[in-house]
Image (spheres, rainbow, N blue to C red):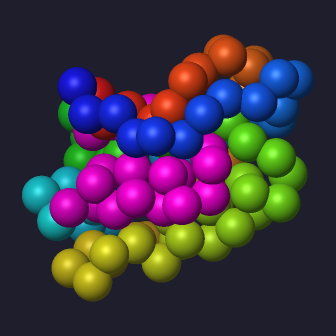
Amino acid sequence: MIVSRAGKGVGVPACRYVVQGRVQGVGYRYFVLRQADALGVSGFARNLADGAVEVLAEGSDAALADFEARLREGPAFAEVASVEREASPERGSSGFHIR
């Protein structure tokens, strides 16, 4: 498991994102890890069987808004077709992990 240095806040909003497109095999999860670390967002990213990437993130409203914008961009070799967002219960995560 790979973990970033980003810490956890108390009582912070949480969102679940499902990112569709060419997002597996192109470094997308590692891109997400770097963005989360830069913004102080905690949570995880993992590949789904259907070719999408699931991201669970916790952070301030401003950090999550910036994070979502970065998820929509993706790294150079990715092609993000869509990003679905839904509110998620707070998990109390510490750092950001790739699963």
Of 7 and 98, nearer the camera is 7
Name the residue at 20% across, 55% down.
Answer: 24
Q: Where's residue 21, x and y in %?
A: 33, 65
Choose top left, top right, bottom left or bottom right for residue 56: top right
Does residue 21 appear to the left or right of 14 in the view shown? left
* Quarter occupied by the N terminus: top left
Asked where in the image residue 78 lies, by quadrant, the reply is bottom left
Q: Is residue 21 among the parts visible in the rendering? A: yes
Residue 29 in magenta stretch: yes
Instruction: Check the image and name the residue furthest to the left.
Output: 25
* Residues drawn in magenta: 27-48
Check residue 33 for magenta coloring.
yes
Residue 51 image offset from top left, x and y in percent = 24, 47
The reply, left or right, for residue 80 in relation to residue 27 is right
Q: In this view, does 23 lie above or below 4?
A: below
In depth, the one of 96 and 19 nearer the eye is: 96
For the point 62% across and 45% down, the residue is 41
Is 12 drawn above or below residue 36 in the view shown?
above
Pinpoint residue 62: horizontal percent, then vertical percent: 83, 60
Q: Which residue is drawn at 25% across and 67% down?
A: 22
